[in-house]
Image (tube, grey):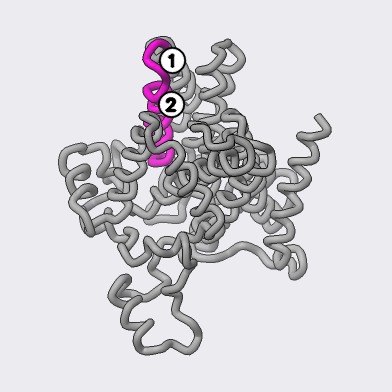
Amino acid sequence: MSQCLLLVACASALTALYFSRVFATGEMFSARDSLYVYLPAFHYWREAVLSGRIPEWLTLDGFGQPFAGTLVVAPFHPSKLLYLLFSLHHAFNANILLCFPVALLGVYALTRLWEVPRAGAFLAGMAYAFSGYLVCITNNLCYLMAAATVPWALWATERHLRAPGAGRLLLAGLVLALVLLAGDVQAFCVTYGLVVLLALSSPVESRRARLVSVLGVLGVGTLLASPQLFSSAALMGTAQAGGRTLDIAQEYAVHPLRLLEPLLGAYLEIPDERPDVTLAIVTKLAPSGYASFWVGSLYLGVPVLLLAGVAAWVNRRSRRLWLWGGVWLFVVGLSLGDALPLYEALYTWVPPWRVFRYPTKLVPFLGLGVCFLAALGWKHVFEAEGRRVF
């Protein structure tokens, strides 16, 4: 228990240190969608509930739409309780800041299932929580909350697959449902796929039992997410799906030049004094300017990439690594949008995929994979003495 409290304290302290400006100045997260979507919607929800009314109709877009069906504002997510306890300003800041220790501890718990040393698991958690994507997506809360929840969904599912039980089944389904309740249906569907992959990547002798167990997790997760699923489905019946055209769906894709960002950081950022060369490059990548990138950075860091490389080399003959690595490369291909034909093929041949937009939204899954591999690399370097660990 004391170790858990220490971990929570360390993760919270790192978050407070990283975002010290918020505490020092009292400023509020209010960039982009925070200002135009979340703050108005949450203000409306807070005022309605505090006055004893049910927030039924959100009048912020056109003629409005049902609040319960507006997935992006996460109407059923438990984080809404913050807005009843604190002012809008402090609740919104707390909602965002809590995502970072949650993400860190989720990766820590997930990697510890593979017996990664505590230090390596904590490093992987820090790398994921404070990666360029998660830090930059603070302007879009639903995607931040979903990305912070995904490691916990994989952790809870793997625990249940290893030792099935009613309590573990309920927990795995609940955490999986929270990915959707955070407001990101694409992350929810991709996490479904990863949960199935956890079962498929098991040894042959246990694969059938794990597949049966994972079907139970998916069923419970769907059942617990059903209030949001039914509400959003009812709204979709009178609205057009998100990805109206292929061009719109691929508007925010990862340009191939940005594949260097996990190593170099946001080297394409336009500074205050804009050199002609930098401006020309960024204008080519994003015609409306740097602000039109979905996120400003995809940074992970040199130590993380080196440790991930060590784990990949040591486990190069592992069938499980090749399976997960193949899926990871497929997601990389999807994230590149129109630079490769993969996204167009999926958009054309899998109609439900057309609801999703913006290939860059797949980046946190790529980052999570690299951070997990880095944790295994730490285990190899400091404990495994040359043995395969995956």
Relative horizontal placement of residue 291, taking residue 170 as reference (left or right):
left
The N terminus appears in which quarter of the rendering?
Answer: top right
The disc, 1 or 2, on the residue closer to the chain's N-terminal end is 2
| Magenta-drawn segment | 184-205
| Vertical comparison of 246 with 165: above or below | below
Observer-nearest of 237 and 209? 209
The residue tagged with tag 1: helix, strand or loop?
Answer: helix
Q: CA distance from mark 1 to mark 2?
A: 8 Å
Say whether residue 75 is visible.
no
Q: Which mark is residue 92?
A: none
* Residue marked by disc 2: 198
Query: What's the amino acid at mark 2?
Result: Leu
Relative horizontal placement of residue 304, taking residue 3 as reference (left or right):
left
Q: Position of residue 56 (x, y in %)?
A: 50, 40
| Vertical comparison of 72 with 256: above or below | above
Quadrant position of residue 268: bottom left
In this view, which residue lies farthest toward the front? 385
| Vertical comparison of 38 with 216: above or below | below
Mark 1 closeness class: few <14, some 14–19, many ≥20 residues within 10 Å: many
Query: What's the amino acid at mark 1?
Result: Arg
Q: Position of residue 312 (x, y in %)?
A: 43, 42
In magenta segment, residue 282: no
User: Residue at 53% of width from left, 45% of height from top?
Assistant: 374
* Residue marked by disc 1: 210
Quadrant position of residue 260: bottom left
Relative horizontal placement of residue 84, taking residue 195 as reference (left or right):
right
Mark 2 closeness class: few <14, some 14–19, many ≥20 residues within 10 Å: some
| Vertical comparison of 161 with 30: above or below | above
